[in-house]
Amino acid sequence: MTTITDYQRSLDRVFAQSRELIPAAPTWQAGLYHAIRACYTEMSAHPDALHLHFIATSTDPLVQRTRSRHRARLLRLLQTTRADAPVPLHAELLLNQIHATLREQIADGHEPPDLDAADQTFATLLFDYRAPTVA
């Protein structure tokens, strides 16, 4: 079994959880928060997956495609199960911002943030989100 196969299995486990978490949440932000938290918990439990998800995606096209497919199916799930979902571009930008923030923390040579610190990042970015207005 290869590392990329293990990584894909981790993403599949996260998606299976997200299929229950996103629709059951009271708001789209809460649903996405729970899905992202499940993803971070899964990645943290598997150091190779954590490295692939946050670090290797910037240099390895295969890992980048694997993570991009996961992100796309997560966004489709959000759009198809939540009437209150933001437009896809806004949701994608939020996911990218969360990912970039955590990648920066991990790439700076620090240990990955513990779940409480990661939760703070997720909550701040998701629950303080204000949809852009059109002038």
Image (cartoon, rainbow, N blue to C red):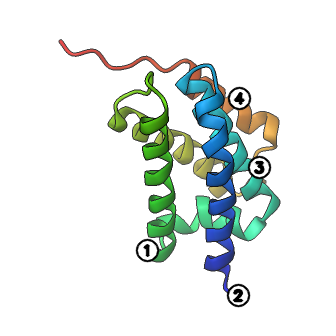
Indicate the secondary structure of the residue bearing disc 1: helix
**Label 3, on which residue?**
41
* Nearer to me, 39 or 105: 39
**Label 2, on which residue?**
1
Residue 128 shows which numbered tag? none
Q: Sequence-wise, which precedes: disc 1 or disc 3?
A: 3
Residue shown at the point (28%, 15%) measured from the top left: 133
What's under tag 4, amino acid-wise? Gln
87 relative to 18, above or below: above
**Label 4, on which residue?**
120
Q: Is residue 108 visible?
A: no
Residue shown at the point (51%, 62%) measured from the top left: 67
Q: Could you classify mark 4 by the number of other residues whose Cα lies within 10 Å: few (under 14), some (14-19), or many (20 or more)?
A: few
What's under tag 3, amino acid-wise? Thr
In the image, taking residue 133 as reference, residue 52 lies left or right, namely: right
Q: Sequence-wise, which precedes: disc 3 or disc 2?
A: 2
Q: CA distance from mark 2 to mark 4?
A: 35 Å
Residue shown at the point (34%, 30%) measured from the top left: 87
Query: If the image is split into quadrants, where does the N terminus sit?
Result: bottom right
Q: CA distance from mark 1 to mark 2?
A: 19 Å
* Nearer to me, 65 or 73: 73
In the rendered image, residue 6, in percent from the top left (x then y), is placed at 69, 75
What's under tag 2, amino acid-wise? Met
